Image (spheres, rainbow, N blue to C red):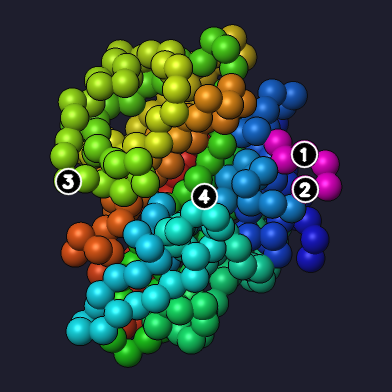
Amino acid sequence: MAELILQSGAWHARVLPDAGGLIAALACGDVPVLRAMPPGSRSPLDAACFPLVPWCNRIAEGRFAWDGAEVALSRNFLPERHAIHGHGWQSAWAVESHDPGNCTLVHRHDGTTPGWPWAYLARQQIVLNDAGCTITLSLTNLSERLMPAGLGLHPYLRRRPESRVRFAAAGVVVVGADLIPTGEALPPAHFADFAAGAALPAGLIDHCFTGWDGTASVTDDCGTITLAAEGAGLLHLYAPEDPAILCLEPVSHLPDAANAGAMPLCAPGETVSLSLRIGVA
């Protein structure tokens, strides 16, 4: 199925299951909440939102040690030398169910290719109602051994010159030139006082914030976008110099957590989940 159209009250969305299980547009009335994909594009990098599963952000050099063996992953974002964002965003998702205001998509991995040696089932439910859009992403371990299990969502929020970002966190994780954490931390207001609401500074921010309380907002001349997440104690802020791109990504672990021994774990048959509610005020 090439495209799903969802509508509930003033909220409407387009979903492209087989192009990475991505949301292509999300709006409330005539006002975009997430950016809309250009006509004809099917690239997740042009999406309104895409899922991060079974890991988030980068795994350095596409390799990590696990249970006495090396796991080698495809370098899936060339020319970058790291593996990034998991498999879901570059895989076709099947439509499990579809009603006017919601859909459920599934993505299965058999544990053999492309290098992730655990079988799993990922499920993504997208629900519209009067309060907004809720995206719930879950991951079930179908293998017979403990599996590292990362989840996240990568929404591209509306960004305008007037945009002010607000969220509370405990600190900023320092990364090197390769965007892999160094082990150091900075105060949460290092880039701007986001706890009080702040404009984005010039230059690239591609950093994870720890101790996030699960809520955030972006306010501009069109109104306020609100975010409320569960299952994510970290917020990754991606704001490049491109004035059209702003991502506030709820994630379950830090970049390169697989090499730091800090990945969340999922037992055989267990399911872990993460959800994000996007609203307006």
Mark 2 falls on what kind of element?
A: loop
Look at the image and give the residue range highlighted in magenta. 36-41
Question: For residue 199: magenta?
Answer: no
For the point 26% across and 46% down, the residue is 181
Q: Quadrant of residue 96?
A: bottom right
Q: Tag 3: residue type?
A: Gly
Which is more foreground, mark 3 or mark 1? Answer: 3
Q: Position of residue 136 (x, y in %)?
A: 48, 54
- In this rendering, position of residue 190 left or right of residue 105: left
- Spatial CA distance of label 1 from label 4 is 22 Å
Q: Determine which of the numbered discs, if any, sits on residue 38 in the image.
A: 1
Asked whether disc 3 touches disc 2, contact meaning CB atoms under 8 Å apart, the reply is no
- In this rendering, position of residue 200 left or right of residue 10: left
Mark 1 falls on what kind of element?
A: loop
* Viewport quadrant of the N terminus: bottom right
Asked whether disc 1 touches disc 2, contact meaning CB atoms under 8 Å apart, the reply is yes
Mark 1 / mark 4, whichever is N-terminal? 1
Q: Position of residue 117 (x, y in %)?
A: 40, 83
- Spatial CA distance of label 4 from label 2 is 22 Å
Bin the neighbour count of mark 4 within 10 Å (Cα to Cα): few under 14, some 14-19, many 20 and up. Answer: many
For the point 35% across and 41% down, the residue is 177
